[in-house]
Amino acid sequence: MENLGMFYKECRKQAGLTQERAAPMLGVEPRRLSDYENGARVPDDVVSLMADAYNAPILVLWHVKNRTPLGRYLPEIMPTRTDADLGLLTVIARKNAARAEESIMEALEGGKLTERGAGMIDDYIRYNEATTGGMLSGMAYAVKIRNGFGSRLPAS
């Protein structure tokens, strides 16, 4: 199994920070940050500081999904590293949402869930989980873009 701490390290590196520069921003010693990046449990408040310092809001989603008991209720979080990833996630999420709609509409006959349709609920759930995961991942990346560009984004 891949070291779960690698995601913390990857986010720090993407922010262009060394452990020595990042540690004071997180209120920890560089050695402690190294421990976190090598698999030690990271307190939630430190994860929040990491997300801000690294401009990586997806880090919070990833942390909750992979490091807390509540994570089992979240959809899979997909790495989003480029603007093209954001576009692709959006297209895939839209297609999965359409598949979810098709599944539930087919499952409902005359506005009621039939016995035959009940077997299609798994498809509906699977497509909705994929949609939600893609949208959350894309939204976290979009927040990173917004926070990174600040007022340089065109006015809407």
Image (cartoon, helix red, strand yellow):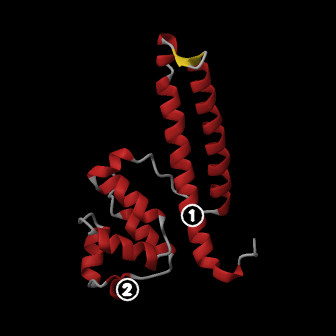
Location of the C terminus by quadrant is bottom right
Callout 1 touching callout 2 (CB < 8 Å): no
Which labelled disc corresponds to residue 141?
1
107 relative to 95, above or below? above
Three-letter code, disc 1: Tyr
Expressed as whole percent of the image width and height from the top left, the position of residue 69 reads 27, 50
Q: Looking at the image, which is closer to me, 39 or 149?
A: 149
> Quick check: 38 left or right of 111?
left
104 relative to 34, above or below? above
Dot 2 alpha-carbon crowd within 10 angstroms: few under 14, some 14 to 19, many 20 or more: some
Q: Residue at x 61, y 71 (%)?
A: 145
Expressed as whole percent of the image width and height from the top left, the position of residue 5 reads 33, 63
Give the quarter of the image for residue 147. Answer: bottom right
Outermost front residue: 111
Q: Residue at x 52, y 54 (%)?
A: 136
Q: Dot 2 lies on which element?
A: helix
Q: How many marks?
A: 2
Q: Residue at label 2?
A: 25
Q: Residue at x 50, y 11 (%)?
A: 116
Expressed as whole percent of the image width and height from the top left, the position of residue 87 reads 68, 54
Q: Looking at the image, which is closer to me, 25 or 118?
A: 118
